[in-house]
Image: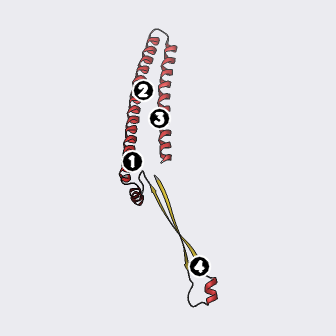
Amino acid sequence: MTEDKALIADIEMTPNKKTSKANRQSSLLRQRQVAIEHRSGPLPSPEEFERYERVCPGAADRIIKMAEGQSLHRQDLEKSVIKSASRDSLWGLIFAFLFSMANISGAVFLISTDHSVTGTLLSGIGLVSVVGAFIQGRNLNRDLESQKKNKV
């Protein structure tokens, strides 16, 4: 909950008493005083809690329980996202390893059967694709992190 309050008060200030009465009346100074209060968080201010409690007894406790429930829900979602990202990363590494081993095996087989140009091309293409995927994944992670920093 974000809350902004502004208190504005007009203050009249009189000039020095040594000046004439006409001068004093024409040179009254007006100042505006502004006080701004900014709060951010899931709970209302203590004054608002008090007002809620006066209007509906038990409302403050219900609001706190609602905020606690929302916090637990958000934490569970974050745990789930982290767990699935970890799992996906592990599977990505496993499949990259298997692909690389198959690629190297195929290249070695081709080179050993007198297809050296084809074997070399196969190993080069496999290497470029794995390195390219790795670099693309790093750039994607960097972009996601910069977006998270910009939101905060």
The residue beneath circle 3 is 138
Callout 4 crowding tier (Cα within 10 Å): few <14, some 14–19, many ≥20: few
Secondary element type, mark 2: helix
- Tell me which numbered mark, 1 or 3, is placed earlier along the sequence: 1
- Tell me which numbered mark, 2 or 3, is placed earlier along the sequence: 2
Please state which amino acid type lies under the numbered disc 4: Leu
Q: Residue at x 50, y 46 (%)?
A: 151
Image coordinates of residue 20 in percent, x first then y, are 61, 90
Q: Residue at x 51, y 63 (%)?
A: 6
Secondary element type, mark 4: strand
- Tell me which numbered mark, 2 or 4, is placed earlier along the sequence: 4
**Front disc: 2 or 3:** 2
114 versus 131 height, above or below: above
**Front disc: 4 or 1:** 1
Q: Which mark is residue 29?
A: 4
The residue beneath circle 2 is 92
Front residue of this view, candidates 100 and 5: 5
- Tell me which numbered mark, 2 or 1, is placed earlier along the sequence: 1
Asked which quadrant contains residue 76, the reply is: top left
The residue beneath circle 1 is 67
- Tell me which numbered mark, 3 or 4, is placed earlier along the sequence: 4
Secondary element type, mark 3: helix
**Front disc: 2 or 1:** 1
According to the image, what is the colour scheme of the structure?
A: secondary structure
Please state which amino acid type lies under the numbered disc 2: Gly
Q: Are marks 2 and 4 in contact (CB under 8 Å)?
A: no
Mark pair 2, 4: CA separation: 72 Å
Asked which quadrant contains residue 78, the reply is: top left
Image coordinates of residue 139 in percent, x first then y, are 50, 36
Front residue of this view, candidates 148 and 59: 59
